[in-house]
Structure formats: C-alpha cells, structure tokens
Image (tube, rainbow, N blue to C red):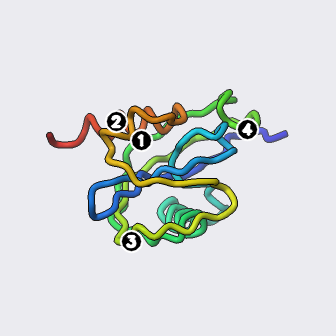
Amino acid sequence: MRQYPIVTVGALAENPQGEILLVRTHKWNHLLGIPGGKIELGESQHGALRREMLEETGLAIREIRFLLAQDSIDSPEFYRPAHMILLNYHCRVDSVEVQLNDEAQAHLWVLPQEAISLDLNLPTRQLLEVFLAARPV
C-alpha cells in the first residue's frame, strides 16, 4: 500500500471555438472529467501535462496556465481508494480531432457554461466552477 499521495496533472483544454474537452472514463465511475494522469519521477508538471494530454487525447497543448490544486482522498467516485493531489490547468489546443486511448470511453467538446450542468466528477465540477468564476463576462 502507498504511504504517500499520488501527484497528478489535468487540464481544461480549450479549442478555438471556446469549447472545453471532457472525457468519460471508468476510472471515475463513468462520469465526465478532464484528461490527465500521474507525474512520473523526474518529470516537470508541464512536461507531464503535455505527455498525458498527448497520450490520452492525441492533442498537443499550448498556453498552459495553472488554475487549482485539489485533494482527492479516497473519493467514492474513483475506481479504487487513493490519496491524490490534483494539479489542474487550463490550456489551449488548435485541433478538435481527439484520439482517445483506452483510459476513456467517450469525449465531447462543450462550452464551459454548458458543461456545469453535465454529469461531472466532483473534482472537475469544482475546477469548472473556479474557471467560470474567474472568466470575464
């Protein structure tokens, strides 16, 4: 059993139309969330985010901006007990052509203000609320 938290990165990826990418994954009880994953030993946060986004979605990202750090301790939504520190970012992508790996079963592009009404996992809902509150009207 792990004796320390798992540090992860994830991002609200925004396309040129202002839509964000959400993925549906079995790891989060088939709820919608953001792509991301663990930081590997010796890897920077931005390097891990670029790698995870490319592996999970096939998307290259740019303009990475930190948004929020969250604790996820034995979340009932997550597929197993885990203590994770979630480092969340906003980034931009130039393409909407998503190529999912086996970690997600589906994806959608949606405007952030519309995403809040969808079946999001709790960390993604909280991240989206912070993102929307910080956006100019």
Secondary element at tag 2: helix
- Left or right, 118 with respect to 92, comes to right
CA separation in Å, label 1 and label 3: 25 Å
Please report the residue visible at 33 percent of the width from the left and 44 percent of the height from the top.
112
| Amino acid at dot 3 | Ser
Label ID, residue 130:
2
Q: Nearer the viewer, mark 3 or mark 4?
A: 3
- Residue 73: x %, y % from top left: 65, 30
Q: Nearer the viewer, residue 85 or 92?
A: 92
Looking at the image, is mark 4 or mark 2 earlier in the sequence?
4
Looking at the image, is mark 3 or mark 4 earlier in the sequence?
4
Q: Which residue is mark 4?
A: 79
Secondary element at tag 1: strand
Label ID, residue 95:
3
Q: Nearer the viewer, mark 2 or mark 1?
A: 2
Please say if the residues under marks 2 and 1 sit with CB atoms less than 8 Å apart: yes
